[in-house]
């Protein structure tokens, strides 16, 4: 099948590479000429396990190509995916300018029937806006042409995106027109062999399903962080509580890890955008507001612990920081808790020596020439002459470090762990002052 994908970011690139891998003829379009030039060379501008190999393999097989030529893009695919960014606007709503720009492009250049598939995360009602935009442009051209608009939200997780796309838990197809269902089913057949994963529903429900999923996951995290803060003050250990509640199958063990707050390109903006949608229709979504507020507060927890430990005297202190990406296996720094922490430390006069297995370039791009930031070659380099270690991202490489080496490299043996990676009694035996999240019995 011939497929065009507008937007070659995390979602567009993974979608393009995976659809090419199963034999389709895919053309990826992006307005970022540098990104396209990089991709044409078979290099990928993001860190995503398994993706580079897939991209190179499919370019060589002639099934995957990249271009900035939007006219060629519209001419190429019967299926026209929209996978561009929907960042938060100033008021918290999802900014649809890129989505609607693609709709405009498709309406301007299409010459025959097209299925427009919205893969970006967009508020309920966006498919109608896309349809209206395309229709108005076709009308302006004085032509009559058929097209369909389908909502097909993406649920991949950065860090496991290729696997998630190849073996999805669900494929949501939101369409108000049965003729597209058959074509979309055919498109997704290679990913639907093991058992039925395709759920066909109306467009608005499909659009809302994506927000519901992210809001639910964000709620689980904020709930656990709220409980962690309570546990800390009550002298309980949230890790014991987690195990205790997770054993109830109605609750389950997934996604109930306490930590130093959620970040990334999706949860914060999607919770906010859903809240905005609610406000627009006059509904007060109290729970969503609380999820956001708890998370904003949680992102300050590590700084507050560090500040308290050093009795407010952070000027001139050096803090080693392990983990910059918002989660492991990605280089994505969008809304990362590490950013909140570093910015608070800098404001308090401390400096940061940081290491991340994948996000160093991205950090350099964001904080170019930031005084008070040293990016180090290895986790151990980050510790040299630092006053304390802070763990912000739970990369595997940080899970079982050599504590005696850490102790001899640090000026004082103090660890602030934003991900509860270590065993408190063990660290205490090793001679560390150890601060974790919600493990109140360990507060000095
Ligand atoms: N990143 C994720 O984990 C994830 C998961 C599921 C859904 N989503 C959603 O998917 C969408 C894309 O997210 P992303 O993380 O891939 O974004 P991204 O910022 O990584 O990529 C978006 C790309 O779109 C390009 N673009 C912008 N306007 C364009 C246009 N008019 N024509 C062609 N290309 C254009 C940009 O240059 C950029 O390369 C968002 O709505 C996001 O919420 C993201």
Image (cartoon, rainbow, N blue to C red):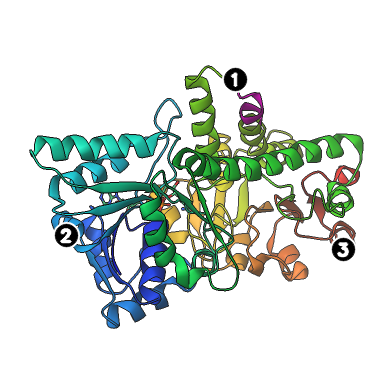
Question: Label 3's element?
Answer: helix
Q: Is residue 243 magenta?
A: no
Picture quarter with the C terminus: top right
- Residue at position x 63%, y 61% in the image: 383
- Residue at position x 25%, y 48% in the image: 147
Tell me which segment is drawn in magenta.
285-290
220 to the left or right of 145? right
Relative vertical location of residue 236 with respect to residue 363 in this rendering, above or below? above
In this view, the mark in front (1 or 3): 1
Label 2, on which residue? 75
Which is more N-terminal, label 2 or label 3?
2
111 or 3: nearer the viewer: 111
In this view, the mark in front (1 or 2): 2
10 or 105: nearer the viewer: 105
120 or 95: nearer the viewer: 120
Label 1, on which residue? 284
Label 3, on which residue? 426
Relative vertical location of residue 289 with respect to residue 160 in this rendering, above or below? above
Q: Main secondary structure of the magenta part?
A: helix
**Callout 2 environment at 10 Å: few (<14), some (14 to 19), or many (20+)?**
some
Say whether residue 186 is visible.
yes
Please state the horizontal and vertical placement of residue 214, each as a whole percent of the image: 58, 44
């Amino acid at each position: 099948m011939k497929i065009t994908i507008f937007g070659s970011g995390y979602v567009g690139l993974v979608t393009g590479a995976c659809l090419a891998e199963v034999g389709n003829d895919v053309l990826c379009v992006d307005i970022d000429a540098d990104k396209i030039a990089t991709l044409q060379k078979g290099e990928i501008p993001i860190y995503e396990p398994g993706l580079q190999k897939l991209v190179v393999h499919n370019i060589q097989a002639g099934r995957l190509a990249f271009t900035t030529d939007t006219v060629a893009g519209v001419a190429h695919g019967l299926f026209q995916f929209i996978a561009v960014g929907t960042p938060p606007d100033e008021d918290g709503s999802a900014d649809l300018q890129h989505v609607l720009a693609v709709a405009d492009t498709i309406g301007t250049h299409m010459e025959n029937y097209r299925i427009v598939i919205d893969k970006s995360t967009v508020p309920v009602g966006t498919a109608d806006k896309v349809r209206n935009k395309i229709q108005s442009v076709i009308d302006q051209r004085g032509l009559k042409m058929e097209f369909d608009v389908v909502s097909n939200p993406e649920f991949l997780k950065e860090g496991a995106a290729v696997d998630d796309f190849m073996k999805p838990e669900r494929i949501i197809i939101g369409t108000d027109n049965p003729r597209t269902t058959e074509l979309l089913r055919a498109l997704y057949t290679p990913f639907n062999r093991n058992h039925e994963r395709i759920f066909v529903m109306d467009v608005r429900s499909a659009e809302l399903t994506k927000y519901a999923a992210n809001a639910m996951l964000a709620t689980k995290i904020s709930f656990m962080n709220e409980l962690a803060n309570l546990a800390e003050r009550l002298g309980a250990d949230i890790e014991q509580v987690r195990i205790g509640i997770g054993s109830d199958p109605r609750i389950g063990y997934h996604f109930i890890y306490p930590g130093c707050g959620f970040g990334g390109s999706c949860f914060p903006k999607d919770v906010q955008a859903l809240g905005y949608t609610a406000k627009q229709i006059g509904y007060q979504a109290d729970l969503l507001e609380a999820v956001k507020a708890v998370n904003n507060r949680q992102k300050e927890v590590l700084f507050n612990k560090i500040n308290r430990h050093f009795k407010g005297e952070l000027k001139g202190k050096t803090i080693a920081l392990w983990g910059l990406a918002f989660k492991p296996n990605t280089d994505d720094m969008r809304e990362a808790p590490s950013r909140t922490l570093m910015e608070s430390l800098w404001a308090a006069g401390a400096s940061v020596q940081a290491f991340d297995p994948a996000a160093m370039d991205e950090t350099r791009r964001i904080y170019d020439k930031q005084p008070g930031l040293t990016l180090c070659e290895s986790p151990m380099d980050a510790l040299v002459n630092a006053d304390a270690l802070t763990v912000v991202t739970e990369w595997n490489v940080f899970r079982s470090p050599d504590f005696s080496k850490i102790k001899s490299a640090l000026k004082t043996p103090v660890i602030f762990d934003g991900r509860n990676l270590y065993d408190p009694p063990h660290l205490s035996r090793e001679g560390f002052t150890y601060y974790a999240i919600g493990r109140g019995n360990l507060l000095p």
